[in-house]
Image: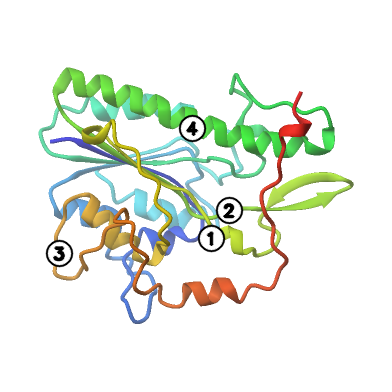
Amino acid sequence: MGALIFIVTLFGSVLIIAYHPPFVQRFPRYDRTLIDLAKTAGIKTYWISSQGMVGKYDTPVSAIGKKADVTVFLNKGEYSAKNISDYALLKSFRAALKDPIRQSRLIVLHTIGSHPDACNRIIDFKDPYRVKDKNYEYLACYVSSIKKTDDFISRLYEILSKEELRTGRPFSIIYFSDHGQVHKLNDGKILLNNNVASKFHYDIPLIKIDSDNKDLRLTLSSEKSGLNFTEGLANWMGIRNPDLLLYDLFDGKKDPTDFGLKRKIESIKTPPDPAIDLSSHLQ
C-alpha cells in the first residue's frame, strides 16, 4: 500500500478542518479527528511538525498530532519559541517512509510555511527574492517563503518518487494553507500579518499530486469550504463511513452548501487587499 502525504500550514481553523464537526452545529468533535478516522481504517498515522507544541493556538492542534501512531514535534514550545526550518522535517519524513509496514500510511507534515516573521523563515533558503527598495523587503521575504514551500514540496516529491521506484508503492500528496494574510504599512514599509480580516484570507491554495497521474495537470476554480474537509480527506484516503458524506475535494464542483461561510466572507467590510506586484522592485 502507498503513502498519503498531507502537508498543512495551519493555525486556529485547524480545529474545524481536522476535527469532524456535526453538520448542524459545526463545532469540533474532539473524539472524531482526521487521525482517528485514518486509524480506524487501518492506516498507520504520523504527525511531524515544525510548528509549536504548546501555546494558546498550538496546544489544540498538538492534541490532534499526539493521537497519531508516531509523533515528532521539533519545537516543544510556542510556534515562535524556535525558528525551525520546514526542511528539518525531511529527516523524520524519510524515517517514516523507511518504516517496514505493509499497510497504508498517512504522514501529516505540519509546516511553519510563511508565518511571521517571514524573513526568519528563509534564512536557509538559497534563492530568495531581493529588492532595491527596503520598504518592500518584508514582502520579498514573504514571496520567498512561498518559493521555499514550493521547493519543500518538490523535495518531498523527489523522495517519494525514489521510494516508489524502490518499493513499487504509489503516493499521493495534498497541500493546503488555512488562511491568507493582509498587508499594512509601517513607516512606509509593507508588512504582512493578520491585523484585520480580509475576504482574501479565505482564498487559499489546495493542491493534490498523485504518482498515478504524473502527466495530468488540471486547474480547478470550484469553491471548496474547509467545513467539508473531513469528508474530502476521507474520500482521498479511500475511507467509507456511514457518518460521512461522499465528497470529493477535486471534482471541480462548487460545494452545494458551506454552512453560511460564503455569507460570512461577503459581510467583511474591510477594503480589498489584492496581491502586490513585486516584479518592478526586484534587484
Q: Position of residue 78 (x, y in %)?
A: 56, 46
Amino acid carrying mark 1 in the image = Tyr
Say how many tags the image has.
4
Q: Which residue is mark 3?
A: 241
Q: Is residue 201 above or below residue 219?
A: below
Q: Position of residue 262 (x, y in %)?
A: 49, 72
Spatial separation of the CA atoms under disc 2 and disc 3: 32 Å
Q: Which residue is mark 2?
A: 180
Q: Position of residue 16 (x, y in %)?
A: 41, 64
Spatial separation of the CA atoms under disc 4 and disc 2: 16 Å
**In the drawing, what numbered circle is on residue 175?**
none
Amino acid carrying mark 4 in the image = Asp
SS class of the residue under badge 3? loop
Q: Pointer 2: residues within 10 angstroms few (<14), some, or many (20+)?
A: some
Q: Nearer the viewer, residue 194 or 202?
A: 202
Q: Position of residue 157 (x, y in %)?
A: 34, 28
Which residue appears farthest toward the right when viewing the image?
187
